Amino acid sequence: MAVKECANCGYRSAESFENDICPACGVTFWKCRECGYILKAATLPEQCPSCFKKCEFKNVTCYTPECGGPGNVDPSL
């Protein structure tokens, strides 16, 4: 069985994360560098669920109070 690892905090589990959300840190927002699609996931998919390409993703989660903190997308990214 493959170990799941959170791309945000590094939390590792032998079981899959419920709804692909890391139980340790919560929501991570990822933006596809190809089409701009934003998804919530603790780990990155093999391909973008919007453009279906194998793309790089950028973490666009807000980590500061100015943009609402975790649970929000940082609009400057």
Image (cartoon, grey):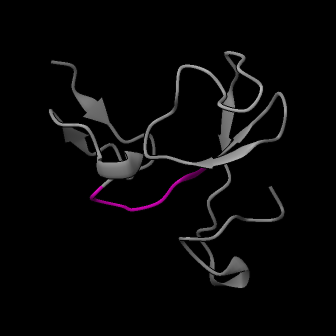
Residue 49 vs residue 43, the one in the foreground? 49
Q: Is residue 16 above or below residue 8?
A: above
Magenta span main SS: loop
Quadrant in the picture for the N terminus: top left
Identify the residue shown where x is 38% and y is 50%: 19
Q: Is residue 31 above or below residue 56?
A: below
| Left or right relative to 34: residue 32 | left
Identify the residue shown where x is 52% and y is 28%: 45
- Numbered disc total: 0
Identify the residue shown where x is 63% and y is 47%: 39
- Residue 22: percent from left, percent from top: 34, 52
Residue 39 lies in the magenta stretch: no
| Left or right relative to 56: residue 25 | left
Q: Quadrant of residue 62?
A: bottom right
- Residue 74: percent from left, percent from top: 73, 65
- Residue 67: percent from left, percent from top: 72, 78
Residue 17 vs residue 66, the one in the foreground? 17
Q: Which residues are magenta?
A: 23-29
- Residue 65: percent from left, percent from top: 63, 84
Identify the residue shown where x is 77% and y is 25%: 51
Quadrant in the picture for the C terminus: bottom right
| Left or right relative to 72: residue 17 | left
Residue 40 vs residue 74, the one in the foreground? 40
Q: Is residue 64 above or below residue 14?
A: below
